[in-house]
Amino acid sequence: MLAICASIIFTFQISTFNPVTAQDQHFSMLDLDPLLFNPAYSGFFDGTARFGIVYRNQWASVSAPFQTLSATAEVGLLRDRRSMSGLSAGLWLTADREGTLDYGTTAASAIVSWFKGLGNGNNIVSLAAEAGIGQTGFSEDEIVMGDGTETFARTRATYPTLGAGVAWYCQLSDVLYTKLGISVRNINEPDISYTGLSDDARLSRRYNIYGRAEWRMTSSWGVLPVVGYQRQEGFNELVYGCDVRWYVREKPRDYLAFGAGLMGRHGDAAALNLAVLWREWTFGFSYDANLSKLAAASHTLGAFEVGVVYMISKKDKRVQSLPCPIF
């Protein structure tokens, strides 16, 4: 199984040749924080509510580590099986701290998504809008200025932000599904200047693409390739990989599955992901090996992630080989 994952990753490595630079926020366990890539994935779960938290610690061996924390909460407001449509509300919180200047961003976004099943429900389209507020800043204690008279007008910048996304799910057969999403963040390009000058610095739009599929090879084993891409002001991040999953038990009250996968962040890192899905809980762990030019300084030590997701299931949940993610 893992050999299949390795083959998929190798194919991506030889077919992509543009240099890639990491984005301001990223995770290797993409499915534990789907709202990072697309607000339209709010409500994409077969339950009444879902809550998750993911923590990432990167480059702990190089000066001050980069730390990122993300938390999500989603609630299904309306789900009509007859019309195959509904509404969902979500809240996404994130905070990160980087380097000796304690530079970081704290942000919160509220999300509303609308989804609609097409035809017999094997296709589902979701549209979402988000609005939030963020604050970015740093500590002046460790700054050494070239000119002693130079100062900053402020060390904190608070700004509003807007985003939108669209997602599509398609169940091609009883053993194969795929989903694809496209989104844009920071549509309003807010001012984050520390100098007080107009238009001195703005938070550029960030474009995201995410795709996931699952093929049930047998009743107990599945293969799940995934790809995620982000672009912001000329900087790119491409993440790709494949998981294998062993479904031990699929009864709603006694659900148990184990997952393992290999991920690649192009030009930056390779990661091993592990997951346990037990009843309403999903537990994840990931470790990145640094393959970038910083590998010598970091002794190839990259990052580790831990995360947990809890979903409140529906009482009448039905068991299927590949259940619909919403209805």
Image (cartoon, grey):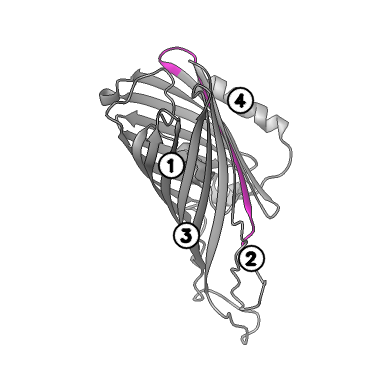
Mark drawn on residue 87: 1
- Closer to the observer: label 4 or label 1? 1
Disc tally is: 4
Q: Position of residue 163 (x, y in %)?
A: 56, 53
Indicate which disc, 2 or 3, sits on the residue closer to the N terminus: 3
Given the current orientation, which residue lies at the most extreme front position?
A: 82
Residue 256 in sight? yes
Q: Nearer the viewer, residue 306 or 228?
A: 228
The answer to whether residue 205 is above or below residue 210 is below
Residue type, mark 1 in image: Leu
The CA distance from mark 4 to mark 3 is 35 Å
Q: Label 2: which residue?
A: 202
Q: Label 3: which residue?
A: 107
Say which element carries label 1. strand
The CA distance from mark 4 to mark 2 is 37 Å
- Closer to the observer: label 1 or label 3? 1
